[in-house]
Amino acid sequence: MASRPVFYTIIQQKERLSKCALAVVLAGSFLVSSPATSWSQSTPIQTGASDTSFTAVPENKRFRILLRMIKAKVTNEAERLLQAFPFTGKHAQNRTLFLTGLIAKSRGDYELAEKNFRTVLANDPKLTMVRAELAHTLFLAKKDDSAKHHLQLLSDAAPTPEAAKQFDRFIDAVDARRPWKLSAYASMAPSTNFNNGTTRQTIIIGGLPFTVDANSRIKSGIGYRGGANASYTFHPGKDLSLIVGAGLNFTEYAGKTYDDRIVSQNVSVVRKYKSGQVSIGLTASQRWSGADEFILEVGPQVTITHKINQKVRAFAKFRHLRTKFKLAEYRNGGTSTADFRFSYGLSADTVLYALVGGQRTGTRRNYLDFWSGYGGLAVYKELPFGITYYGEGKLTKKYYDGDFPLLGEPQEDTRLNFNASITKRDFSMFGLAPRLEYTYTKSMSNSAFSRYSSHGLNLSLTKAF
């Protein structure tokens, strides 16, 4: 119980965090749940002339003794014992890496500490105590995106609500110390069908053959994607934030027909409460699509993040956008969307997701107006050998209002989306880990123009690892 007020004081002070005390809280909260033997503060530590008796102690107890020595800042003696009497049992490598990582961390060598902790987690991602030390090391090294990634996993899998709140408050401390947030990405994007075109050259409508325009037929190639986003957070009051942001995103393939550039702006007011937060704001975007089309979108947006219980977190986003096209004026109108995501923290290395949502789009042509809904499942899983897997499958149904020209009935579409990504989390370049993503789309429709399939790859770098 003594660790709780220490942790709360640390969170309140934010930048004046006590490195040693916080490390004890992070590691200690998980040490108590370990099946190891408990050692009291009065347990004598055998050193020097009594080294012989140290070797007679079982390795799991030797590990606890060395851990206590490092936490007590007796790092030189702990290092000497570790080198003189190395571990030889089943967990020898992980124990040695973890303890040498703690020694490096206590000496301010965060690069070596991070490397050691990541190597241990690459071997066994279920070691929660190691993840807690890695999260703290990343925070001390000011690698906030990576620190928040691990703190979120720890919060979702925390053994008690109190422990989860500690990690959530630490996340708040990370956010509070850096009002500016900058991010950028660039990737290659090979695709077998980047324009979602049909494989057919002619189609039959009403018994008559029609030639499919070249721009509507399947096109494959290698494109490029990239962008940058920036935001600034003001804190006018306790638990109240004002966030302003802007972004630029682009996609390019051969020629100008399928080029896409989007500039976006947003402003929102965020209010935090006991179990989550609510954000109310306004978003706008200007989009240059293809060679000539320009699209303007603007509208309100509300997002809610709520922790339902110790393991389940819900995210909801509601948005309504008014859309104006420069050339295709018949598409002018509005779109309302509702998206929900539920996460279940099975463990610190495994998170399950349920996805559901809907959309209503209205234009100046009733055969382009539609309702749509989707549902899906996803999983985040850290595997041995430093591999992180994320897989997501989603099924979408779309129903149009009016009869599509020449089709004689309203169009109905069914689309299957699947994407899977692999991240090598124990290998990084400039603080970024490589991520390879595969996407598959299968569209089924009563309109031949909307029946297609595509495969794509995306190679990128990420800070969330």
Image (cartoon, rainbow, N blue to C red):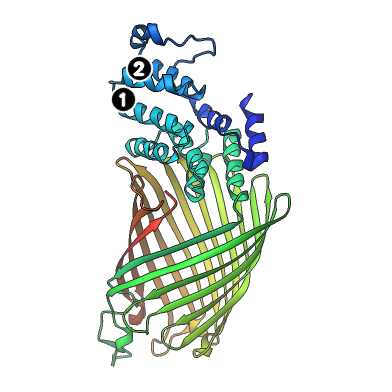
Residue 204 against residue 253 in the figure, above or below: below
Nearer to me, 57 or 320: 57
Given the image, on which type of amino acid does mark 1 rest? Ala
From the image, tell me which residue sits under label 1. Answer: 92
Q: Residue at x 61, y 68 (%)?
A: 266
* The residue positioned farthest toward the right in the image shown: 237
Disc 2 is placed on an element classified as helix
Given the image, on which type of amino acid does mark 2 rest? Glu
User: Where, by quadrant of the figure, is residue 112 drawn?
Assistant: top left
Residue 440 against residue 44 in the figure, above or below: below
Q: Which mark is residue 256?
A: none
User: Where, by quadrant of the figure, is residue 391 drawn?
Assistant: bottom left
Q: Residue 138, image x and y in percent?
A: 48, 43
Quarter of the picture containing the N terminus is: top right
Is any part of residue 36 visible from this angle?
Answer: no
Q: Residue at x 39, y 70 (%)?
A: 225
Q: Which mark is residue 59?
A: 2
Residue 178 against residue 183 in the figure, above or below: above
Label 2: how many Cα within 10 Å (few below 14, some 14–19, many 20+): some
Disc 1 is placed on an element classified as helix
Q: Residue 251, image x and y in percent?
A: 40, 74
Label 1: how many Cα within 10 Å (few below 14, some 14–19, many 20+): some
Query: Count the marks: how many?
Result: 2
From the viewer's perspective, is 124 left or right of 271?
A: left
Q: Residue 74, image x and y in percent?
A: 48, 21
Is any part of residue 363 visible from this angle?
Answer: yes
Q: Residue at x 35, y 13 (%)?
A: 58
Q: Earlier in the sequence, mark 2 or mark 1?
A: 2
Q: Are marks 2 and 1 in contact (CB under 8 Å)?
A: yes
Q: Residue 396, image x and y in percent?
A: 43, 66
User: Disc 2 and disc 1: Cα gap in Å?
Assistant: 9 Å
